[in-house]
Amino acid sequence: MTTPILNVRGLVKRFGGLLATDHVDLTVNPGEIHALIGPNGAGKTTLITQLMGELKPNEGTIEIDGKSVDGLPTAKRVSLGLARTFQITCLLPDYTVAENVAIAIQVRQGHSFRFWRNVRSETMLRDEASLFLATAGLEARADELVANLSHGEQKQLELAVALATKPRLLLLDEPMAGLGHVESQQMIEMLRGLKKQVSMLLVEHDMDAVFALADRVSVLVYGRIIASGTVDEIRDNPEVRTAYLGEGDELC
């Protein structure tokens, strides 16, 4: 059998008497987009922060490509192939689009922040950065300050920054948040096009995006996964409809 890119077993996170992550089992397979859905407060972002090593679980194991990352810091997990985008973009607004991507390239290469000390390094960084910007549809905005980008363009740039670390698994924390219909469709097409390059765990409230992209879907409610399956299986699951939307509602 193929080794999962991500393999989570029995993950538990407690905050006092609150069980925020309740013995979660979750896998993401190579070349797969696995969506994680659930109502507000279900524990989705708490789970993501544990995967990234930003929050230590109380119990359970996390493996990346068959290797345990339990106890490893975030930087080490990134070096093993994890990358994350955020609900609210996390960029350097006073630097250009290309500079933001170049920083991510330097971090991946293990260098400190030394911007373009000579022509050779500038050329190498800009050439590589331009490839990721082209993937994100931002090549024409390379020299624009991030502060001048629209919200949708900042979402695209954050994706380019994440890709610049050359991840094997991309953790997407609500990439459609704040996007209009046209921008959401553009993001869906972008993520669909990336599927052959990187596996993804997609945390998202936009059900149209989830059903358009996901190979499998897991539903998290009060820290516990109540169902996992294909899009059709999740759409037709009465427990999911009751827990996620309320009795009598349907997942569109």
Image (cartoon, rainbow, N blue to C red):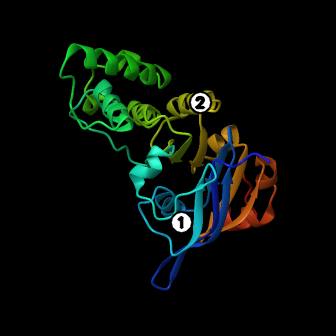
Foreground residue among 161 and 204 = 161
Element type where label 1 sits in the image: loop
User: Residue 137's spot in the image, x, y percent?
Assistant: 46, 21
Asked if one can make out residue 42 in the rendered structure from this viewpoint, the answer is yes
**Dot label at residue 53:** none
User: Residue 173's spot in the image, x, y percent?
Assistant: 50, 49
Q: Residue at x 23, y 31 (%)?
A: 95
Residue 66 appears left or right of 145: right
Query: Which residue type carries mark 2?
Result: Leu
Read off the residue under disc 2.
194
Query: Which residue type carries mark 1?
Result: Gly
Q: Residue at x 68, y 41 (%)?
A: 30
Counting other residues with Cα less than 10 Å from the Cα at mark 1, is it few (<14), some (14-19), or many (20 or more)? many
**Dot label at residue 43:** 1
Q: Earlier in the sequence, mark 1 or mark 2?
A: 1
Q: Give the answer, above or below, for where 18 lies relative to 106.
A: below
Q: Give the answer, above or below, for where 167 lies relative to 53.
A: above
Asked if one can make out residue 252 in the rendered structure from this viewpoint, the answer is no
